Amino acid sequence: MKMHGILPLLACIIAVLAVAGAGCTGTVDQTDGTGLKDSYIVGIDDNYMPFSYIDKDGKAQGFDVDSMRWIADKNDIKVTFQGVDWDSIIPALQAGKIDMVYAGMSITPLRQEQVNFSNPYWTVVQDVAVREDSDITMDDIHAGKVVLGAQRGCTGALWIEEALVDTGLMPAENLKLYRDTPLAVNDLKAGRVDAVMYDDVSLKDIIEGLPMKIIGSVETQEQECFGVAIRKEDTELLEFMNEAIAELRADPYWEELKEKYNL
């Protein structure tokens, strides 16, 4: 079981509070008098195993999905899960089509300009996968010598754009963007890209059983943290989710979830 230390998570919390201190037409349901509703639509990435995904029967599954179900059951609220394309999920939240994003969303300064985030609940790094017989190294990645695949709108894609394309190390056409990472992995298998970059736990899950290997990870500018994204004006919901996540992480069920999803 992969263990994530408390120090990186504390660092994430401090970073979120620092940015928040710097200033960094929805669904209609009956409220309980506190500004909270009795029903919420939770936006998820429908192919982000093990955090959120839609199974073959059309049911939402994953670490984040089960976490939200636990919170809903504990607080007697109803939740439904809606898969949304990742590069459209914040606009969907802002437009009121969903009430929150609980799907392994990294807290970044750019996103914090658009939405509020709960306190962080997880930390990740960006791994790089190549074909099993490949001799590509992380030095080749940092030098921009390969064709890289990444999921559109995700941290890996943003890092490639900023660190490699914008600096002139890699031609823009060598960055191939995809709706989801399994599609990028399919192109890696077919030889249409040389490597794929994505969040560590999920990428390992996606390539399991395939003739591929992880060659390393990249250091992003800040430690990457996951949080729940909430509209700026929904301050009561933000407070509720912070309290609910803290309660979940203190409950034995949190460890059960980590074991269930091999985290």
Image (cartoon, rainbow, N blue to C red):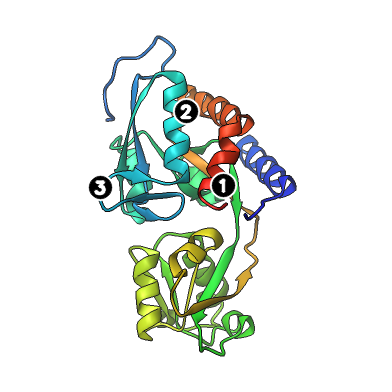
Residue 23 in view here: no
Q: Quadrant of the N terminus?
A: bottom right
Residue drawn at x 65%, y 66% as measured from the top left: 219
Three-letter code, disc 2: Ile
Residue 65 in view here: yes
Q: Residue 259 carries which label?
A: 1
How many residues crowd around disc 2 within 10 Å: few (fewer than 14), some, or many (20 or more)? many
How many residues crowd around disc 3 within 10 Å: few (fewer than 14), some, or many (20 or more)? few
For disc 2, the marked residue is: 71
Q: How far, Cα to Cα, is label 3 from label 1?
A: 24 Å
For disc 3, the marked residue is: 58
Is label 2 or label 1 in front? 1
| In contact (CB < 8 Å): disc 3 and disc 2 | no
Element type at marker 3?
loop
Front in this rendered view, residue 65 or 32:
65
Front in this rendered view, residue 204 or 83:
204
